[in-house]
Image (cartoon, grey):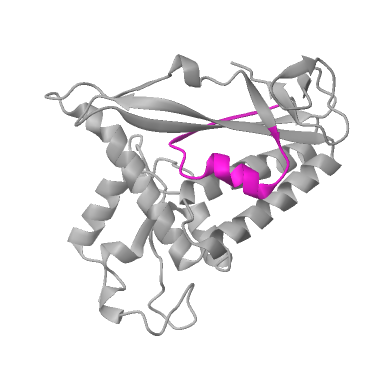
Amino acid sequence: MSITARSRKRLWARSGNRCAMCRRELVREGTPPDGDSIVGDECHIVSATRGGPRYDPEFPREKADDNSNLVLLCKVDHKVVDDQESKYTANLLRDLKAAHERRIAVQLEGFDSDKQPVRIRQVAENVPNFLRRIRSGKELLAIMSNACAYALDYDELRNEEEVDLVSGFLQDAQDWGELGLDEVGSRMRAAQSLDEHINGLEQSGFWVFGCRENQLIEGGDGPASGWPVAHLRVMRDSNPEIIKMNENGAGPSKKDAPQGDAPDGASRRM
């Protein structure tokens, strides 16, 4: 049995011609005399082949090529998820696929001419004045999980080692956030992975700051609904924008690097 035309069409349509992980466009327009280039793969979540990635002998063979067992990925991410199957479990890939298809559906609602255009609006009272320092993966996961958008920022980096360190952390944090992770075990593993990132950053002189801002999505069908945005920023611990919080954590007291275990935060850069 092979992937049917119907399953293939549903997969590409619901994925919006984008990789479910990195969101890269998967069909590149050709130039004369060459045709278009397809850089996407229809990837099996559970392999139908014994010894294949995430193979499960109890998984129904007749569902192996069904749309529900397929996720659209670029060729790079396809190799990553198959090489790292202990991290990218079947449940994790199903969550990633569902989150990506929900995001595409929301974005496409605004193209119906009979509906009000879809727009994202900030709510003044929900705009944070500053970002709080994040000290654990569990705390960071609470900010990132199921966010509809991610505002990521970082201080200027000085070498390739810092680029790898910071970019790896930001990408991992966003990936875990997009997956949702309803299962307790998956959340614990994600928090542990982020703990390791945060510790590594702190050993290299970086601190992590973040917050969650509740914006609104309006238009399309139905009333306005919440559109949570996860703000995340990596700063050098010597950055003068870092402010020390009052003992009760209510607000900034003076503009210098936080000391000890007192609550601390950072001015949010607009």
Say which quadrant the N terminus sits in: bottom left
Q: Quadrant of residue 247?
A: top right
What residue do we see at 42% from left, 25% from top?
Answer: 215
Q: Is residue 113 left or right of residue 83?
A: left
Looking at the image, can residue 114 be seen?
A: yes
Left or right: residue 59 compared with residue 144: left
Q: Is 81 situated left or right of 114 in this image?
A: right
Viewer-closest of 118 and 218: 218
Residues in magenta?
A: 133-154
| Residue 31: % across, % down | 36, 34
**Where the C terminus falls, by quadrant?**
top right
Q: Residue 11: x percent and y percent?
A: 28, 54
In this rendering, is residue 216 above or below 135?
Answer: above
Of the pair 197 and 12, the residue shown nearer to us: 197
Q: Position of residue 54 (x, y in %)?
A: 47, 73
Magenta segment includes 134: yes
| Residue at 25% from the left image edge and 58% from the top image edge | 8
The residue furthest left is: 114
Q: Residue at x 27, y 74 (%)?
A: 63
Residue 249 drawn above or below residue 199: above
- Given residues 224 and 173, the one toward you in this image is 224
98 in the magenta segment: no
Q: State the image quarter where residue 159 is shown.
A: top right
Residue 189 x, y percent position in the rendering: 62, 60
Q: How many marks?
A: 0
Q: Is residue 23 above or below residue 250?
A: below
